[in-house]
Amino acid sequence: MTLLEVRGLDAGYGDFQALFGIDVDVAEGETLAMIGANGAGKTTFLRVLAGQVPTRAGSITFEGADIGAVRAHRRVGIGIALVPEGRKLFGSLTVRENLIIGAHPGRPGRWSLDTVLEVFPLIRPLLERPSHVLSGGEQQAVAIGRALMSNPRLILLDEVSLGLAPVVVKSLYEALPALSEGGATVLLVEQDIGQALSVASRVVCLLEGRVSLEGRPADLARSDITAAYFGMPATAGSEGPS
Amino acid sequence: MEWLNAVVQGIMLGGLFALFATGLSLAFGVMRFVNLAHGDLAILGAFVAVSVTSALGLNPFVSLVIVVPVMLAAGYGLQLGAFNFTVGADPLPSILVTFGLGVVIQNALLQTYSADSRGLDVGSIEVESIAITDAIAVGWIPLITLAVAITVLLGLQLMLSRTALGRAFRAVSDDPATARLMGINDRNLYAVAMGIAFATVAIAGVFLGIRQSFGPTDGPAQLLYAFEAVVIGGLGSVWGTLIGGLLLGVAHGIGGQVEVSYGYGSGPLLGHLVFLAVLATKPAGLLGRRTE
């Protein structure tokens, strides 16, 4: 079943248009990775889905309903949670408060403080600390946990790996299957293609605001991905992006 | 002994300053909103109490039961209907709009109540006091004012630190865009904060009216003291607001005693000097968070 259906989506900031006629479907239960170079429009796409950037044209259908006009603070209530780029924890709140504030009264379910701590046990000893003293990896775990607290149908992960040590990224990615098992469909944005392909059931590549490639990781040749990522055919012997 | 008395009376006066400053500090802390009509709103609250007491024959203290909800609703409505359009990174629109609102309030009060000075009469308690020593006595009204100020600020602090509403206030203060991702309607929350700010300044206005006579154009002077108290204590800090109010009150008390003893200076003058000294040496205030 299709959970999210995006058709002909245009979006941007001021005079700058970031997305051009995006068509994307997300099936319930899948893990979709959106890859692309810096500035390809990946983050903008997630921000449009979360209601932080308005659509200029096209439609967004979520669980059969058009949500284009639903304001940002109501999107979490219908089951869309964004883990924003740069984590964006609330610095004057403790870790516990950061998690609790993610919960939504209209969305009870599997995820609670206890179940989030089971998936991210590293957070447990940090609960009473102010969030701004945490390391980047700890902050990212809290940010994902905070989004889970609302029991989302669709969780949007923006650049989970950004600025983190590889070992930390690896442990965060190992937690992702738990999100799917908990009933959430995952849409993740990554520059780190290798990491994205390792968890994704399907990949969409953006190039300068347009979909340049779409398919299942197993069906895509490395050279196709490289061409779609950079917008030029891969030269012989190139390894492509990491 | 008279100097000690000046300090004690100053602390009592500081309670009133802290009450004035509370709403200003809350609005700035939650949404970086500078309300230049704050003093006029206090006077408005006092005049509303005048109408309520004369129409219903209530004691001014009891009139708070009506005045506070009325002002709370006014603050909520004004934020939703007007102030929300000025909230943002640039403080200038809020300054201009509230400056204009202050002018409107002053003239509306002049039209409605005339330029005559008014007072709120609470009966004989106004002149009663507790003698601590032969030379020092504390009036009941200033003591009640200080107690109410501490209670209001303590309540505000508990609300901010312990409740879901307070958590939302802090989250919105940190990052309104991310707070929206948590399902928080920041615009509505701003209106709640402004409602609370109006409620506290209405209490301050009523206590001002009990303490001294007041007229429609007395607001700006009260705004000045509230600003000084907030800046001394630290913008957006609850305890800073109390400390700032008390320190300003003590400065007024000592300045007044200087005037009595030596024939020059005045309470407000020393208050202004303390304010300038804090601004020059600790611009974030004594307990202020260093903001970006």
Image (cartoon, rainbow, N blue to C red):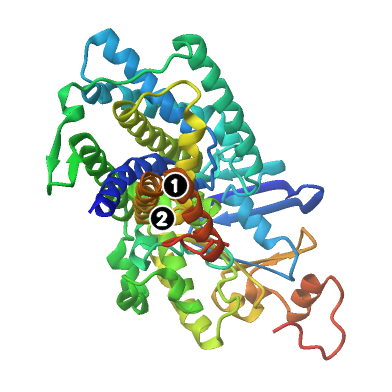
A1 displayed left or right of A226: left
Q: Residues within 10 Å of mark 2 (few under 14, many from 20)?
A: many
Q: Percent from the top left, x then y, of residue B213?
A: 36, 24
CB contact under 8 Å: marks 2 and 1: yes
Residue A6's place in the image compared with A145, above or below, is above
Q: Residue at x 27, y 67 (%)?
A: A114
Task: Name the residue: 34% across, 13% down.
Answer: B51
Residue type of the residue flagged with mark 1: Ser
Name the amino acid type tagged 2: Ser
Specify whether disc 2 shares its chain with disc 1: yes
Residue A194 picture location, percent across and down: 63, 81
Read off the chain for label 2.
B
Residue with the most extreme front position: B262
For this rendering, which residue is in front, A225 or B191? B191
- Callout 2 secondary element: loop
Q: Is residue B199 visible?
A: yes
Q: Which residue is mark 1?
A: B25
Q: Is residue B116 above or below residue B135?
A: above
Asked whether residue A75 appears in the rendered view, the answer is no
Q: What whole-number distance in Å separates the C-alpha atoms at marks 2 and 1?
A: 7 Å
Is A188 placed left or right of B130 in the picture? Answer: right
Residue A183 lies left or right of residue A224; in this view the side is left
The residue that disc 2 covers is: B237
Mark 2 or mark 1, which has the lower sequence index? Answer: 1
**Image quadrant for the C terminus of chain A?**
bottom right
Is B255 placed above or below A223 here?
Answer: above
Q: Nearer the viewer, residue B229 or B198?
A: B229
Considering every residue shown, the one lying at the far bottom of the view is: A237
Helix, strand or loop status at disc 1 = helix
